[in-house]
Image: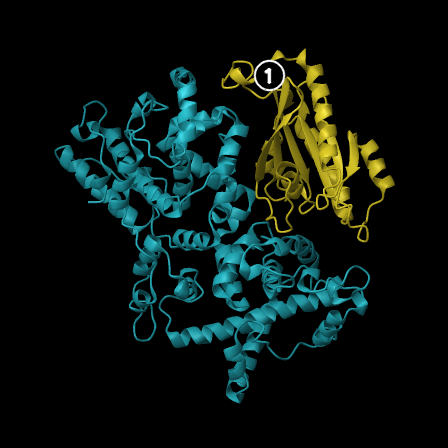
Amino acid sequence: MESDSIESGYVGDLDADNEEERNTKPMTHIVQRPCSHDGSFEQVDIIPSKLPPAGIELNTDVLLTSRTDPLTRSQFQAMLDPDGRLISEHALRKAVFLGGVSPDIRKEVWSFLFGLYPCNSTTREREAILIDNIVHYHEMKTRWKTMLVVNSVPGSTPIEQGLYARYQFAEDPGPGCDRDNEAERKLKERLAPLVTGKRADQIDFESLGHTDLQRQYSSSEMRQRIDFMRLQAQVQVNRERVDVLKLRSNMRVIDKDVPRTDRDQEYFRGKANPRLGQMREILLTFVAYHDQVGYAQGMNDILSRFLYVMGSEAETYWCFKTYMEKIRNDFMEEGLTRKIDLVRMLLKEMDPALLKHLELIDLGNLFFCHRWLLLGFKREFSYQDSLRCFEILSSHHLELSSLEAERAVMREERREFENTGGDTRTVGSSTTQKDYTFEVFMCATVLTECRDDFFLCLDCGQAFSYLNSLKFDLDSLLTKSERMFFVYCKKTVCDSFQIVDTKEDVPSKQQPWSLASIFR
Amino acid sequence: MTEVLFKVIIIGDPTVGKTSFVQKYVNDSFRRDYKMTIGVDFALKVIKWSEKCNIKLQLWDIAGQERFTSMTRVYYKDAHACLVMFDLTQKGTFQNSVKWKKDLDQKCTLMDGSPVPCLLLANKCDDIERREVTQDEIEDMCKEHDFLGWSETSVKDGIMIEESMGFLIEEMMAKHAELEGFSESFQTNTSSALKLGKEEGGKPSGSNCQC
């Protein structure tokens, strides 16, 4: 569908000068080119022989998309009413999108963001939900543990039964010496009620990360309440089927991945770090009750962020579970392929020449976006930045189905009307591809940002070396992705007008449009 | 000065030590806390083979996990050689080596139609206590499934890393010479390396894959 001129166009340009330029210029410059609403994309220089000075364009950008500092505690508190209800979910999501969250309130904000608590719940209601969550989680764990024990060869050790993994012990017991190990003996004692078929009769709030609740638990009123909750939870949990065979097969992979999850972070460092055991139990609980999804590598990376922020095991579980249920398709081959395909479709709209080039060097499927999309760019940033990136992506403030997008599209439609003398047309955002999530824009932005370097990659290997060496700056990437988002909104409007205007030149379309216009 | 480009893929079950192997070979470093590979990792090493010839070695470290197979198998394409790795302390990974080999042969051959040369690596040989696979078993599998050969390795202690790769490179060079008649395009020299498209020399060749 493309003309040959493009190919010959850039092949000819690949001379020594460009090679030199590639080595000297920063990777993140902006290529100025008209963002075309029509076919003129094809006429644009594929490798612009002269790049505009990068700094100026960048500066204008920053002005346009006022990103903010992370949301502070006092700002957050001002968003809550006296009973602790969130006044406006939209305002919170917007604030998170624009600046992320200050680490000291991250846990509270994430509780809303990831649906641990409803936004309209009061502080008191949340306390009740928390206890219910802990109890329920405890019962879920007890269930699969019991199943493991019941389905094991009599006389096997807790490790053989699958209740624990070796990496949870400071001293590696080694094969065959399980039975004599002291740590294991202690475990066995603790697990005695499980083994004999009786349930452990106390919830260990402390080990679940809620020392404060442990104290409350001793009051008789509280104990009664919890006992009742447990009964209810048991009824619910026992209704679920646990496939022990599947659980064991998932366990084998989980036990390979847990000990290699973010161990370079202080939080997860060191032998027998208790976080490892927590991650293991959360993942096992998840797969025990979601055997259709099962465990796939990468879930450990997702979990690590939740555990780091939430701290307690039960809360982490519920956040993780809610999130996984939402994105489960990304962990299925079909779902992820589809998502990558969205990046490809967006790139085709925004920079078809680049896509064409990537196709030439056998990267047209864009499978290299796999990791970015699966983990929300977790591996591409420092751990702290990856948390911020994760909350920003999860704010879902700027999606094509969001209010912001509707507004941008409407603004563009108004402008277009004015410029064309107010002809009445049937326009609408029907042409927008609403499945383009913000992360899809982020992927496409990375690609267009690096387009010049990609053009210098003449085979798949070179492109991969280049991709390996890529370093992103989170804020600049976000700003540029946002820019592309609005460019896309504008483009869809222009396109829909274009369908109607087939012939005449419309004045507004002749000028390289400016960003400022869409930001009012 | 001529330059030869070889693409080597490394496959096998998760946690057998593929990433560690590549990192050790390319950067001479070993860590215990590598994160698992998602999709594929890529490394490049340039070897001065002789006065007149440099070898550019691409190492494609392919994720061992099962779930996203269609997305990782595309990286088999145009491979000149392959390392199938298993972990001597996990028998299951040894048995699965056959699956990996078959999968490769099914999806990829060299351009003359012959199977991609494949070396079987038995990693973690330093851990004698936990060892679960005997040399005889490996030898048998190697013969039965047409591996080029096999070697025990210990990435941790740096045992048989260079030697295995050296062996594989010799093999690729031999095949390269043999295929040269088959395709003149195989060899690229540095000055003409920056060409694209249908011009000979740009496209990595030497193998012929359907994936």
Establish if A141 lies above or below A356.
Answer: below
Residue at image point 67% right, 59% down: A243
**Chain that bears disc 1:** B
- Horizontal relation, residue B48 to residue A499: left or right: right
Q: Which hue belongs to chain A?
A: cyan
Instruction: Looking at this view, name the residue that lies furthest to the front.
Output: B51
Work out which quarter of the rendered image holds the C terminus of chain A and state it.
Answer: top left
Return the residue nearer the eye: B58 or A444: B58
Q: Amino acid at mark 1?
A: Met
* Number of callouts: 1
Q: Taking the image as drawn, is residue B116 in sight? A: no
- Horizontal relation, residue A92 to residue A196: left or right: left
Establish if A329 lies above or below A217.
Answer: above
Instruction: Looking at this view, name the residue that lies furthest to the left.
Output: A421
Instruction: Looking at this view, name the residue that lies furthest to the bottom.
Output: A220
Establish if B90 lies above or below A73.
Answer: above
Question: Residue A75, position in %: x, y?
Answer: 30, 65
Q: Taking the image as drawn, is residue A190 in sight? A: yes
Question: Residue B170, position in %: x, y?
Answer: 73, 24
Residue at image point 65% right, 61% down: A271
Residue B9, quarter of the rendered image: top right
Residue at image point 74% right, 33% down: B164
Q: Which hue belongs to chain B?
A: yellow
Residue A168, quarter of the rendered image: bottom right
Q: Mark 1: few, some, or many residues within 10 Å (few <14, many ≥20)?
A: few
Secondary structure beneath dot 1 equals: loop
In this figure, which residue is indicated by the disc labeled 1? Answer: B1
Question: Residue A422, position in %: x, y?
Answer: 13, 36
- Horizontal relation, residue A304 to residue B167: left or right: left
